[in-house]
Amino acid sequence: MLDIGIYTIHFVVGLLGRPRSVRYTPNIERGVDTSGVLVLDYGDRTAVCVCAKDSDGPIRSKIQGVDGWIAVDGPANAVPQVSSRRRGEQIQTRDLSVHPHRMVEEFRTFVDMVARHDTAARDRLLDHSQAVLAVATAARRSAGLIPTEQDPS
């Protein structure tokens, strides 16, 4: 969960915010969750995240609604290509790969934020990181991977 799953949580929390409830069902191998299913309940919508280090299947994120869908072809921490289709319309695809290395734009944004002393942007990113870690902690707790807050151990 704290390895590859953190990118998926980052992506979903960035789109939908903090969920009402979190449930994680991991596959445990030698004491480590090597894959699992994370369900984030938002009341009027649900996010289902499948994270795996023990599978080499294609990586894809899909947002599906009654009027269409959006699919990210590739990892959630890169978002290299996005396809979408509204009901009754043609599929549209956009290549978002600006640079060969996925972190170039992230570093440019960081450098710009520091140069402009943009503490508001810093605070938004820190709040987002805290929300992501809260979801990851709740997921691990729901799976019994860490003690509950009431558990004295």
Image (cartoon, helix red, strand yellow):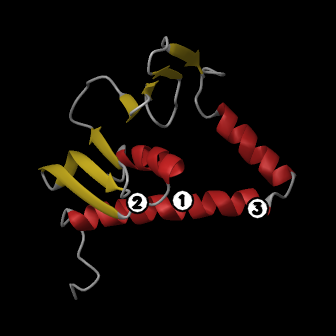
Q: Quadrant of residue 149?
A: bottom left
Q: Quadrant of residue 147?
A: bottom left
Q: Quadrant of residue 120?
A: bottom right
What residue is rendered at 65% in x and 22% in y?
99
Residue with the mark numbered 2:
19
Secondary structure beneath disc 1? helix
| Relative vertical location of residue 36 with respect to residue 146 in this rendering, above or below | above
Instruction: Say whether residue 138 is left or right of residue 34.
Output: right
Secondary structure beneath disc 2? loop
Look at label 1 and name its amino acid.
Ser
Look at label 3 and name its amino acid.
Ala
Residue with the mark numbered 3:
120
Instruction: Say whether residue 104 is left or right of residue 51.
Output: right
Q: Earlier in the sequence, mark 2 or mark 3?
A: 2
The spot of residue 41 in percent (x, y) is: 33, 56
Look at label 2 and name its amino acid.
Pro
Residue with the mark numbered 1:
129
